[in-house]
Image (cartoon, grey):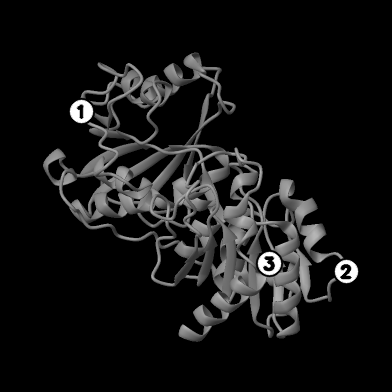
Amino acid sequence: MANIKPQKVINTGNETSNHENILVVGPSWVGDMVMAQSLFKTLKAQNANSSIDVIAPAWSVPVLERMPEIRQAIVLNTAHGEIGLKKRYQLGQNLRGQYQRAIILPRSLKAALVPFFAKIPLRTGFKGEMRLGFINDIREFDKAHLNQTVKRFVALGVTQTLANTHFAIDYPALSINKDTQRQALEKLDLGSNKPAIALFPGAEYGPAKQWPLAYFKELAGKLAGEGFQVWVMGSQKDHPAGEEISRGQSARVINLCGKTSIAEVIDLIAYCKGAVSNDSGLMHVAAAANCPVVGIYGSSSPKFTPPLTERAKILHLNLDCGPCFKRECPLQHLDCLNKISPQNVFSVLKELLSAQ
């Protein structure tokens, strides 16, 4: 076992005195990890001397590094969907004796294994998926009361009594690195003297959350005509979408999809005057980077996963058929997105920018 290293511990540089050590099993999605910062803030507000470590996917480390509440990220090397029982057991063994408390955000059985194997005395999580015994502070999952993802996260960090009330939510706020921002602007040859608007055409969940690319393209043309740089941002998987949006446009419309690290994305978003996004992880990054954002909702609901910022406008048609929360439109018309016009988004964005 000594020769096998199932995890990588990454110190984020945010050291605190060890009055209470808390281990959080983090979520797997970008937006959820950003929203989890509200829980971390709540824990630090309760005890400023606590140290919070997070078990997280490797991709999320740059995001956690921008959260001053986090001491270190612990990367568990399991593939998406992999149970990885042996790896979880070995990681739990390595973490024994280090924590007084664990909070398990995902509601799966496998998410509860490492804190159990680590023999952490207090293990908090929602009831579900036969986790009795693996979790010893079991919370009832009240969908009606905990009607937002961020509420569900924060509720696990407060007492059960307080969780049943209307408790306060402290919005995520990612730290911005001006040096990384400047270096990214130079590396990508982005004009630092021109105002920029970010467009996020991707949504990992599926097509029913993706505003049409033709609409993004039309919006990009309108913004370029107003003198803005338009940065289309996303992962390598979004590169073809970025090419479609930028093709035939002026040089002000730039496809950055797949060309930036997550750290660079955070800093570049913070530089932007505003952003237009599907209900996606980057929408939540923009909110946490204090960038004004227009959020476009299709099959999902802004009541469940709103951008956690006062600097947001939401476009949601609230049709009779929605929110259906499907990956693809079950009625095959996608009216919830197709009926939100580029001119509508353009007008709402200009209104938002004027309000700043």
Q: Amino acid at mark 2?
A: Gly
Q: Amino acid at mark 3?
A: Ala
Q: Quadrant of residue 274?
A: bottom right
Contact check, label 2 and label 3, Cβ < 8 Å: no
Cα–Cα gap, marks 2 and 3? 25 Å
Q: Quadrant of residue 233?
A: bottom right
| Label drawn at residue 251 | none
As drawn, 136 above or below 41: above
Location of residue 215 in the rendering, given as x and y in whole percent from the top left corner: 71, 64
Q: Nearer the viewer, mark 1 or mark 3?
A: 1
As drawn, 60 above or below 302: above
* Helix, strand or loop at mark 2: loop
Question: Of all residues shown, which one is farthest toward the right?
Answer: 248
**Which residue is pictured at 58% across the width and 43% down the height?**
59
- N-term-proximal mark, 2 vs 3: 3
Q: Amino acid at mark 1?
A: Asp
Location of residue 178 in the rendering, given as x and y in whole percent from the top left corner: 56, 72
Crowd rating for badge 1 (residues with CA inside 10 Å; few <14, some 14–19, many 20+) = some
